[in-house]
Amino acid sequence: MDWPAVEAALRTRLPEDYKELTAAYDPGCFANFLWIFDPCHTSVHVNLTGPASDRTRAQVRDDYARGICPAPVDPELLLPCGGTDNGETLFWIMDPLAGPDAWKIAVNEARGPRWFVFDGNVTQFLISVLNGTTSVPQFPDSLPQGGVAFEPSCLDEWTPPLPPTTPPVDTGEIRAWARANGYEVPLRGRIPAEVRQAWEQAQQGN
C-alpha cells in the first residue's frame, strides 16, 4: 500500500493500527455487519478516499450548522473510517491532528440523533464491540451473538445508503413559523434543534 499517497490525498497522517489492520485483512465485513473503509476498495462507498466520504462529511457539517443531530465534536475533526449494513458511519476524531495514533472513534445513528464515542483506536473498537465488552447504542443487541467471522468482499459489492442531500431552507420561514406557534427563537444565529425538528414535523404533516 502506498500510504504516503493515501495520506497526501486525505491531507493527514493515518493511525498505525489502521495500517496494520488493513494489511492483515483484505477489504471485507466483520460479523456480517461492520466494514472498515480501505483505500484499495473499488466501491466508492467503502473506499477511504472515495467521494462517499466527502458527501458524508458535508452532511455532518450541515447538520451541525443547522443544529440537527449535531456531532459531539467540530465536524472538521471527523474523518469517516467505516460503516455498517444499517447505514451508520464510523469516524476518526482527528484530535490531535498531528497525533493520529491517539484518535478516538465516533459512531453516528443512521436515521436518528444519537452519537457514540469510543475512547480507543479503530482496532480496539472492533475488538471491544465484537467480544461484547462495548455496547454501541446504535448497533443491534444481537451483534456479538452473531459471531465475529470476517468475510472478504468482492471489492465492489457493498452499497450502503448514502446520507440524503438536504435542500437549503429559508431560516426566516422557520423563525416566523416558530413565533406563530409559541416558540422563542433568536433573531439571528442558530435555530434551536428542538424548534427545527418541530418545524420539520409540521411540514411532513402538511
Image: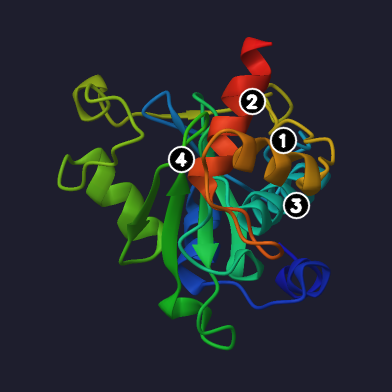
Q: In this view, does 184 lie above or below 89?
A: below
Q: Relative to 107, is 127 on the left or the right?
A: left
Amino acid type of the residue tagged 2 in the rendering:
Pro
Q: Residues within 10 Å of mark 3 (few under 14, many from 20)?
A: some
The residue labelled by disc 1 is 45
Question: Is residue 119 found left or right of 16 in the rendered image?
Answer: left
Disc 1 to disc 4: CB gap under 8 Å: no
The residue identified by callout 3 is 58
Q: Which one is in front in this view, the residue at disc 3 or the one at disc 4?
A: 4
Crowd tier of the residue under label 4, counting other residues whose Cα lies within 10 Å: few below 14, some 14–19, many 20 or above: few
- Quick check: marks 1 and 2 in contact, CB under 8 Å? yes
Residue shown at 73%/72% (left/top)? 7
Q: Distance between the residues labelled 3 and 4?
A: 16 Å
Residue on which the image places disc 2: 160
Residue type (three-letter) at the residue carrying disc 3? Ala
Q: Callout 1: helix, strand or loop?
A: loop
Disc nearer the start of the sequence (1/4): 1
Q: Is residue 184 left or right of residue 2?
A: left
Mark 4 or mark 2: name the one nearer the start of the chain. 4
Dot 3 or dot 4: first in sequence order is 3
Q: How far apart are marks 3 and 1 (CA)?
A: 15 Å
Q: Nearer the viewer, residue 15 or 160?
A: 160
Q: Which residue in the rendered view is the most extreme toward the bottom?
A: 98
